[in-house]
Amino acid sequence: MHNLKQKKPAARHNLIHRLSTKAIVDRLVGFENKIADEFEQKKILFPVHLVGGNEKQLVEIFREVKPGDYVLSTHRSHYHYLLAGLVNGIDARDELEKKIKAGKSMSVFDSRFNFLTSAIVAGTPPYAVGIAWSLKQDGSENKVWCFIGDGAEDEGHFAEAARYVDGWDLPCTFVIEDNNLSVETPKEERYGKNRMMWPKCVMRYRYERTRPHVGTGKFVSF
Ligand SMILES: Cc1ncc(C[n+]2csc(CCOP(=O)(O)OP(=O)(O)O)c2C)c(N)n1
Ligand SMILES: [Mg+2]
């Protein structure tokens, strides 16, 4: 079994525990508002999937994340990245802004705090299984947090990954970020019902999105 060369973050303070929920929510919202403005001013020449409406739920979840845990994200990666940074004592706002301006909003990666994103819907659950398997083999105290949208629930990759994590009791939690939309299509229209039963390694939070699927809602001509 490959021994994961896990980068243990230098002993930094977990900033999530030093800041109030309101302070963190304000940071997140402020960041996305800034990115939205820059997008509309044509300073970002790439698609951006902005987040909104799920700040409090995410802060609550990230209070459980430990420094060195793996955080796997989606096309909607900004809040996950900023929060994973805080957990590891890093204010990553400037770095994220640079990444977004370089067209990497959907492919954010940071080995300092074991963060990676895939824009392929349900692209990360198989990685989550492999990482979690390796962490277990190594006797690590860290775990994997794999964030996916409800659209990824439609994918076989996810079902297989959840079954494997459950069956082998691997250190991984899948978090379904359920806005009841895959782009613009609700679950009932996709597979005939809107409730799915998954093993206990899968948790879900619901939110109503406050922004369009992609962009800001304002047509920008480059
Ligand atoms: C394998 C794959 N199929 C289709 C797409 C196009 N696509 C991008 S986001 C998205 C919606 C996925 O739903 P969800 O994860 O719930 O994201 P949300 O629409 O809520 O942002 C789709 C189908 C993709 N990126 N990857
Ligand atoms: Mg969705």
Image (cartoon, rainbow, N blue to C red):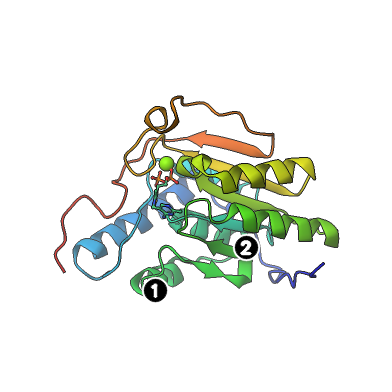
Q: Residues within 10 Å of mark 2 (few under 14, many from 20)?
A: many
Where, by quadrant of the figure, is residue 132 drawn? Answer: bottom right
**Foreground: disc 2 or disc 1:** 1
Q: Residues within 10 Å of mark 1 (few under 14, many from 20)?
A: few
Report the front residue among 7 and 148: 148
For badge 1, the amino acid type reads Lys
Secondary element at tag 1: helix
Number of disc labels: 2
- When the figure is inspected, residue 69 is found, relative to residue 174, above or below; the finding is below
Front in this rendered view, residue 221 or 122: 122
Return the x and y of residue 208 as percentages of the image width and height: 38, 35
**Which quadrant is the C terminus positioned in?**
bottom left
In front of the other: 58 or 184: 184
> Badges 2 and 1: C-beta atoms under 8 Å apart?
no
> Horizontal placement of 161 versus 47: left or right?
right
Residue denoted by label 2: 88
**x%, y% of residue 152?**
50, 45
Residue designated by label 1? 98
Residue 24 visible within the image? yes
